[in-house]
Image (cartoon, rainbow, N blue to C red):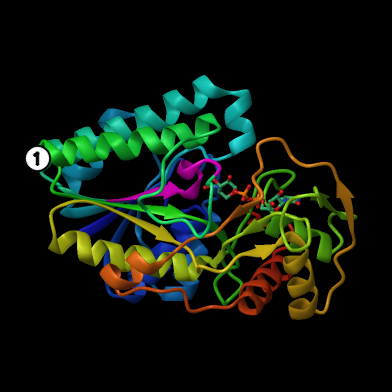
């Protein structure tokens, strides 16, 4: 029986596929390569010695999605595929709502038609909006500040409704904090299109001279050094959380929610210092005004994942930075076909 991984050629998807293969799971990937490259499959094969079956199609194509289920014995799904840039979602809300909802509607329709009842969904800490206190627990109030976050929250609620109605058996919703780093081989990693929105790829590109300096978005937040604090988690730790969530979801029924973070917050300047120490490279920076929509602090209380999934993050910030630097140094222009 196979695990279907949507968006399996993406940053978190590819790292999860590697961990699944190394745990002797049969993996099938659906990916439309809108935010990833076919080269990722070659890298997965280099790391694991196995090449997962690939359907290079779009979940927006219902017939193509049905075909994946018709042609394979699938017992569970990990759903990563979706548009995920916060800023872009504010500029193109209709594109985000239609893409992320329609893709998920088609996926769930095919699951129900083929009797696949178990799904692990890639959600985000962005569903907590601007939390009043930290660390964040799963029972905190939910609110969103952008269309991307709204699509995550609505899909969470839709999956729960389908589970309550018995159309799905088991739903595990993983709310990510800030995934960074790369597989220790340096063969797979974060390959953002164009100018990186996120902190770590911007830092790693600055460190190799691809960017002239990092722009720190604000140093007047109520934090220990005035810069934004986040919960950075190694992407391999995050991948392992998916395997733990999948094992539990196969064994239980109902909908569960887990914050997947380390429980430790680091500021932007903490990360700059950690990256310089881990890589031996300088990261010049300038302080700019705050970025609209950013919050001061966001980090997880990961107790529930530890207690119910038996999972906790293993890698520290030095390892995250070393692995990110190795990937960037080995792949200065990301995946080149
Ligand atoms: C981190 C910190 C910035 C870039 C976003 C999404 C979230 C998830 C992860 C999808 C903040 C500062 C950043 C830069 C900077 N994505 N920063 N200069 O905003 O916490 O979370 O990505 O699931 O949903 O909201 O991540 O890496 O963009 O920012 O100073 O060039 O780094 O202000 O404090 P964020 P980020």
- 157 in magenta: no
- Position of the N terminus, as image quadrant, is bottom left
In the rendered image, which quarter is residue 153 located in?
A: top left
- 129 in magenta: yes
Within-10-Å neighbours for mark 1: few <14, some 14–19, many 20+: few
Where is 319 relative to 130, above or below? below
Start and end of the magenta stretch?
Answer: 120-130
Residue at image position (29%, 30%) is: 105
In the rendered image, which quarter is residue 270 located in?
A: bottom right
Where is 41 relative to 6, above or below? below
In the rendered image, which quarter is residue 31 located in?
A: top left
- Which of 125 and 106 lies nearest the eye of the viewer? 125
> Residue 145 in the image: x percent, y percent?
55, 33
> Residue 223 in the image: x percent, y percent?
71, 58
Number of numbered tags placed on the structure image: 1
- Horizontal side of 212 relative to 107 (left or right) equals right
Q: Is mark 1 within 8 Å of ligand 1?
A: no
- Horizontal side of 4 relative to 330 (left or right) equals left
Q: Does residue 136 appear anywhere in the picture?
A: yes
Query: For numbered disc 1, what is the local secondary structure?
Result: loop
Q: Does residue 79 appear anywhere in the picture?
A: no
> Residue 109 in the image: x percent, y percent?
20, 33
Residue at image position (17%, 61%) is: 250
> Residue 174 in the image: x percent, y percent?
37, 54
- Horizontal side of 121 relative to 160 (left or right) equals right
- Horizontal side of 151 relative to 305 (left or right) equals right
Residue at image position (48%, 70%) is: 236
Residue at image position (43%, 33%) is: 151
Where is 208 relative to 152, above or below? below
Q: Which residue matches tag 1?
A: 166
- Which of 173 and 227 lies nearest the eye of the viewer? 227
């Amino acid at each position: 029986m196979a695990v279907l991984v949507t968006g399996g050629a993406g940053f978190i998807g590819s790292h999860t596929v590697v961990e699944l293969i190394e745990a002797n799971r049969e993996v099938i990937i659906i990916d439309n390569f809108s935010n990833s490259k076919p080269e990722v499959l070659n890298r997965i094969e280099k790391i694991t010695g196995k090449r997962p079956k690939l359907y290079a199609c779009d979940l927006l194509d219902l017939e193509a999605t049905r075909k994946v289920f018709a042609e394979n014995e699938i017992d569970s799904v990990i759903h990563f595929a979706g548009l995920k840039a916060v800023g872009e979602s504010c500029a193109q809300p209709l594109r985000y709502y239609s893409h992320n909802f329609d893709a998920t509607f088609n996926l769930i329709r095919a699951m129900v038609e083929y009797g696949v009842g178990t799904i692990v969904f890639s959600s985000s800490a962005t569903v907590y909006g601007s939390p009043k206190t930290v660390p964040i627990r799963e029972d905190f109030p939910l609110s969103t500040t952008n269309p991307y976050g709204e699509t995550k929250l609505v899909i969470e609620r839709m999956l729960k409704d389908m589970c309550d109605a018995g159309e799905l058996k088991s739903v595990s919703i993983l709310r990510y904090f800030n995934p960074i780093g790369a597989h220790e081989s340096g063969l797979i990693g974060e390959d953002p299109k164009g100018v990186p929105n996120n902190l770590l790829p911007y830092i790693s590109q600055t460190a190799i001279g691809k960017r002239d300096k990092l722009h720190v978005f604000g140093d007047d937040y109520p934090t220990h050094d005035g810069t934004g604090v986040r919960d950075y988690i190694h992407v391999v730790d995050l991948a392992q959380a998916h395997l733990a969530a999948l094992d539990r979801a196969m064994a239980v029924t109902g909908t569960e929610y887990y914050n997947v973070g380390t429980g430790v917050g680091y500021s932007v300047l903490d990360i700059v210092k950690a990256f310089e120490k881990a890589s031996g490279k300088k990261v010049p920076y300038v302080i700019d005004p705050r970025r609209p929509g950013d919050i001061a602090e966001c980090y997880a209380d990961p107790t529930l994942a530890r207690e119910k999934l038996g999972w906790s993050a293993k890698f520290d910030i030095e390892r995250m930075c070393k692995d990110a630097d190795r990937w960037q140094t080995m792949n200065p222009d990301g995946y080149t076909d």
